[in-house]
Image: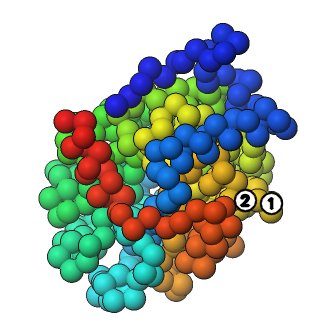
């Protein structure tokens, strides 16, 4: 499935290059056009729409860029209630979603008490494909999630630069995180990863290294999130990641991995002025996420800012329509299952 990551393009440059990543003006338009064409050739006009529920903001990690870090004492911690989440997801979810992502800080208690029973019931009572984004868990607990019926694990490597990874206290060591990603992929999971563009100290070479690291992993998808300085974090005074390098990184991933699931992340609205999220769809994204976290919990799910831009169903559907795209009726889980079969 993975093509050789370094491809020759006319002109003889190795691809991807710093030049592509820094592209602006007509060169950038051309890069994004190629990404758009690659996306449409593989996925047609349709975009996957997934719901996300943030089931707990307890976290045993301490990542400097993230507002949920354990040392943030300004945050009220919550865990969702199984019965009300089930009621929402079984009876009141938006009609456009085909898949659901359960996300939390790294909180094994929430995995046992909420995620696993929720997944079991959702698999029984709905056609939703289920992904999880729950941190680096033990192998046993990961296996229980798979057994319950989740099929995709979202686990970002955050940064491929070891010094940055360590200095920001990202989970464990970079080597452990990468080997956990490989372990998940080798043990039944579709794995989607991701990295943060514009982390302080990253540099454009660092971002290029992140793209290369993603291409080297056995993934079905990858996100690129622009860094947004978090209010109650050690990086509160740092500058945000740039919109253009983020979109260019997405476009390069798309061109090099036409099959991948690449999400448009809501933080594009924070760093991307008017175009925001829609810029992601133009640069190769094929997945949108509708935030379904109950409003009373949402304000405390703090990745960066309390007033983060919430993508509700109306905003997602209008972004898709404005770009001339349509909502996929096939779930991401079904698409991935069919793809795995084709390749076996
Ligand atoms: N800026 C951008 N992305 C962030 N994340 C956490 N904090 C930030 C931030 N300040 C991302 C990380 C994490 C995911 C849940 O959110 O990639 O894995």
Residue located at (76% from left, 59% from top): 275
Q: Is residue 236 left or right of residue 157?
A: right
**Marks 2,1: beta carbons within 8 A:** yes
Residue 59 shows in this picture: yes
Q: Is residue 30 left or right of residue 301?
A: right
Q: Nearer the viewer, residue 232 or 25?
A: 25
Residue 276's disc is 2
Residue located at (69% from left, 73% from top): 307
Q: Is residue 268 left or right of residue 339?
A: right
Q: Is residue 35 above or below residue 44?
A: above
Q: Nearer the viewer, residue 278 or 103?
A: 278
Residue 273's disc is 1
Task: Residue 334: give x, y in percent of width and height.
Answer: 29, 58
Residue 39's disc is none
Q: Quadrant of residue 208?
A: top right
Task: Residue 40: give x, y in percent of width and height.
Answer: 54, 48
| Number of other residues with Cα within 10 Å of mark 2, as a class: few under 14, some 14 to 19, many 20 or more | some
Residue located at (48% from left, 38% from top): 258
Q: Quadrant of the C terminus?
A: top left
Q: Is residue 172 left or right of residue 127?
A: right
Task: Residue 132: give x, y in percent of width and height.
Answer: 34, 59
Q: Is residue 187 above or below residue 110?
A: above
Determine whether the residue tagged by mark 2 lies in a helix, strand or loop.
Answer: helix
């Amino acid at each position: 499935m993975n093509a050789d990551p370094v491809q020759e393009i006319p002109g003889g440059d190795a691809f991807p290059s710093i030049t592509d990543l820094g592209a602006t003006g007509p060169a950038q338009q051309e890069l994004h056009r190629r990404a758009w064409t690659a996306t449409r050739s593989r996925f047609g006009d349709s975009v996957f729409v997934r719901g996300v529920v943030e089931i707990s903001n307890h976290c045993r990690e301490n990542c400097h860029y993230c507002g949920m870090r354990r040392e943030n004492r300004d945050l009220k911690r919550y865990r969702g209630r199984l019965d009300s989440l089930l009621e929402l997801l079984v009876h009141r979810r938006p009609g456009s979603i085909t898949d659901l992502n359960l996300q939390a800080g790294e909180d094994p208690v929430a995995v046992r008490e909420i995620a696993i029973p929720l997944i079991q019931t959702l698999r029984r009572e709905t056609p939703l494909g289920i992904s999880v984004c729950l941190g680096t868990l033990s192998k046993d607990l990961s296996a229980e999630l798979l057994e319950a019926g989740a099929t995709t694990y979202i686990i970002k490597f955050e940064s491929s630069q070891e010094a940055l990874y360590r200095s920001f206290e990202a989970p464990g060591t970079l080597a452990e995180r990468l080997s956990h990603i490989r372990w998940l992929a080798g043990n039944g999971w579709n794995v989607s990863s991701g990295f943060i563009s514009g982390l302080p100290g990253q540099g454009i070479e660092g971002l290029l290294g992140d793209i290369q690291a993603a291409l080297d992993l056995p993934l079905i998808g990858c996100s690129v999130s622009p860094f947004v300085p978090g209010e109650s974090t050690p990086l509160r005074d740092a500058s945000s990641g740039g919109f253009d390098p983020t979109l260019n990184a997405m476009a390069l991933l798309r061109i090099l991995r036409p099959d991948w699931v690449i999400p448009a992340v809501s933080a594009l609205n924070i760093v991307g002025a008017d175009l925001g999220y829609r810029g992601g769809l133009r640069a190769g994204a094929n997945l949108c996420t509708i935030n379904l976290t109950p409003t009373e919990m949402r304000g405390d799910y703090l990745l960066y800012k309390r007033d983060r831009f919430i993508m509700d169903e109306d905003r997602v559907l209008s972004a898709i329509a404005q770009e001339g795209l349509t909502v996929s009726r096939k779930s991401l889980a079904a698409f991935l299952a069919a793809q795995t079969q084709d390749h076996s």
